[in-house]
Image: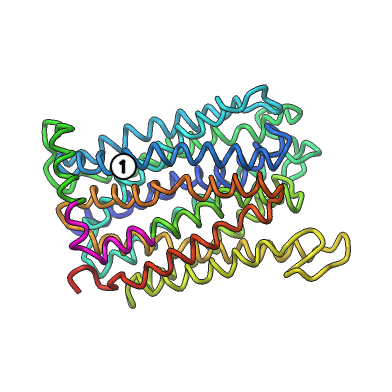
Amino acid sequence: MIDTALRRRVRGWMMFDFASQPYNTLLLTFIFGPYFASAVMDDPVEAQSAFGFAVGAAGFVMAISAPVLGAMADASGRHLTWIKTFSVLYVLGSAALWFAVPGAETVWPILLVFCIGLIGMEFATIFTNAMLPTLGPREEIGRISGSGWALGYVGGVLSLVVMLLFFAENEAGVTFLGIAPILGLDPDMREGTRFVGPFTALWYVVFMVPFFLWVKPARAVSDTMTSVGETLRRLAETVRSLPGRPSFMAYLGGSMLYRDALNGLYTFGGIYTAGVLGWSPVDIGVFGIIAAITGAIFAWIGGRVDRARGPKPVIVFCVVALTLISLTVVTVTPTTVLFVPVPEGSALPSLTFYVLGAAIGAAGGSLQASSRTMLVRLVDPDHVTEGFGLYALAGKATAFLAPLLIGIVTLMSGSQQIGVLPVVGLFILGLILLFWVKAEGESA
């Protein structure tokens, strides 16, 4: 009976990844981001810059809030309450993107609701990830994390397929099936593509049902909310202890940098291909499907390697791979591949980018799954959510950095290719800090 309840709890926990992934897949990367750059704003360079500043601002809000909220949740055990609260922001923020009409007079209200949904998704993820250590023994955490991340990619693929087949229209006003968007949506007003916001909200509402039915608190929940003063005291004690935990500190710093770089690749991948290669939303969607499929496969494989060898070797391998991939990306234009000229109209640049996208998906999926497993090994068992809050702080403290650097370098250079180069430096710095991380945890 206990085993059955635990298995159901694990499956319910994994459904969060499945339900929430479309915000990343559909909104951040493959549908809304490119649509914003090509239709809401008609200048890809200015759009990439504005999008970067907005996502950076959302990252700042999350950075200063995550550790405090995490400490409050650890003290009270009210993880599910926080998840429900931020789920509301996720749903409202994504649904409101329906109002992102082509050629909008002002884009900041659109970016504001986008960031509200993004904040909801990120905070709900923090509290969900903090439940990971309660789902099984230490040696199984890597497998569970990898399988959950793989299921998330499956959700991303399926949601993207539905959008491409039935809703997102190209320049001719038809979907990938060659039909007008269903439900009577007007292709001239890009209503099929704009439906990505309400669709993402609806997907989340439907597929979070198993989570809320099957995932119950692992320990007693306090009847009272921990005071802010007590929360700050607990957090201050944790922060003061960090110098005595060099492995944990190095991991927070290293992961801060390489996760920021990876998010930069994900956030600007669709905008980049739209602006540099001139891809349509359908082209970018196919690119997204390939990347998500490889992400699912290699997150699952990475989880098995994680269980056998531990998370650190997986992390190091993936960061090295992503560094090399990022360097290769800037060499691909409509007329060059690896700086070698190709005939005008050649399909080779697009084919190359499909391969690079598949590689980014594969390395990124494994990296993120093993990263949260590594944190479980390093964090204090009594302060897990606080640890994930610090992990979020480490990620969000510089979450503005990659978007901001991309925005600034793109604006100064006037080149989208040069604009993505900052992610290479972030990957390298993150890799250097991983040298001080103990593979088996702080006590090893």
Can residue 296 be seen here? The reply is no
- Up-down: is 369 above or below 217? below
Closest to the observer, 190 or 207: 190
The C terminus - image quarter: bottom left
- Up-down: is 293 above or below 95? below
Closest to the observer, 166 or 333: 333
- Residue 267 among those drawn in magenta: no
Q: Quadrant of residue 84?
A: top left
Across and down, in percent, residue 98 comes to 59, 28
Q: Quadrant of residue 67?
A: top left
Residue shown at the point (34%, 47%) measured from the top left: 393
Q: Is residue 12 left or right of residue 276?
A: left
The residues colored magenta run 240-254
Closest to the observer, 411 or 227: 411
Residue shown at the point (55%, 25%) measured from the top left: 109
Residue shown at the point (50%, 56%) measured from the top left: 261
What secondary structure characterizes most of the magenta part? helix
Across and down, in percent, residue 431 comes to 43, 68
Residue shown at the point (21%, 55%) measured from the top left: 134
Q: Is residue 279 left or right of residue 323?
A: right
- Up-down: is 120 above or below 125? above
- Up-down: is 3 above or below 73? below
Circle 1 is placed at which residue position? 66
Across and down, in percent, residue 337 comes to 75, 67
